[in-house]
Amino acid sequence: MPQTKIYGVSEYLNPIKSQLSIVIHSCFVDVLQYPSEKRFHRFFPMDKSNFIFPSDKSQSYLIIEISMFEGRSVEAKKNLIRLLLKRISERFRISHNDIEITIFETPKHNWGVRGVTGDELS
């Protein structure tokens, strides 16, 4: 299951956290066929003084970092990014310029999950 971190200005991020989590997870379910009951999101609402970003970004600027097992096709990852951009933009009226997404893939043996390494999961 992907581990997702979402960073944003606290005044903007806090009121939308719950709905944003639902939207993000719906993209994992639809593109990567993840189970609907498995959601791993961590929110990092930041004080403006601790979240420095370029002047071409608005206060609704979001950074989304996704960590997951390696092995998905380039097209699957692109489809995930495209759907995240579309749904977040439509649902929250956030410009695509204010949404940045990074996918970090790691080998399964680098994960510890349910008491075993990821490559030992059945």
Image (cartoon, rainbow, N blue to C red):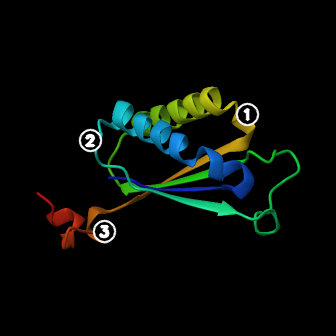
30 on left or right of 116: right
16 on left or right of 119: right
Q: Which of disc 1 and disc 2 is earlier in sequence?
A: 2
Residue count near mark 2 (Cα–Cα under 10 Å), binned few <14, some 14–19, many ≥20: few
63 on left or right of 3: right
Name the residue at the front extreme: 15
Report the residue at 70% width, 63% height from top: 46
Report the residue at 64% width, 47% height from top: 15
* Numbered label attached to residue 111: 3
Q: CA distance from mark 2 to mark 3?
A: 19 Å
Q: Which of disc 1 and disc 3 is earlier in sequence?
A: 1
Q: Where residue 63 sits in the image (x, y, percent)?
A: 64, 52
Kindly identify the amino acid type of the residue bearing the numbered disc 1: Ser
Q: Where residue 45 sits in the image (x, y, percent)?
A: 65, 60
* Numbered label attached to residue 35: 2
Q: Where residue 95 sits in the image (x, y, percent)?
A: 73, 33
Q: CA distance from mark 2 to mark 1?
A: 29 Å
Q: 70 or 80, which is in the foreground?
A: 80
Q: Secondary structure at mark 2?
A: loop
Kindly identify the amino acid type of the residue bearing the numbered disc 2: Pro
Report the residue at 56% width, 48% height from top: 17
Kindly identify the amino acid type of the residue bearing the numbered disc 3: Trp
Q: CA distance from mark 3 to mark 1?
A: 34 Å
Q: Quadrant of residue 82?
A: top right
Residue count near mark 1 (Cα–Cα under 10 Å), binned few <14, some 14–19, many ≥20: some
Residue 62 visible from this viewpoint: no
Mark 1 lies on residue:
95
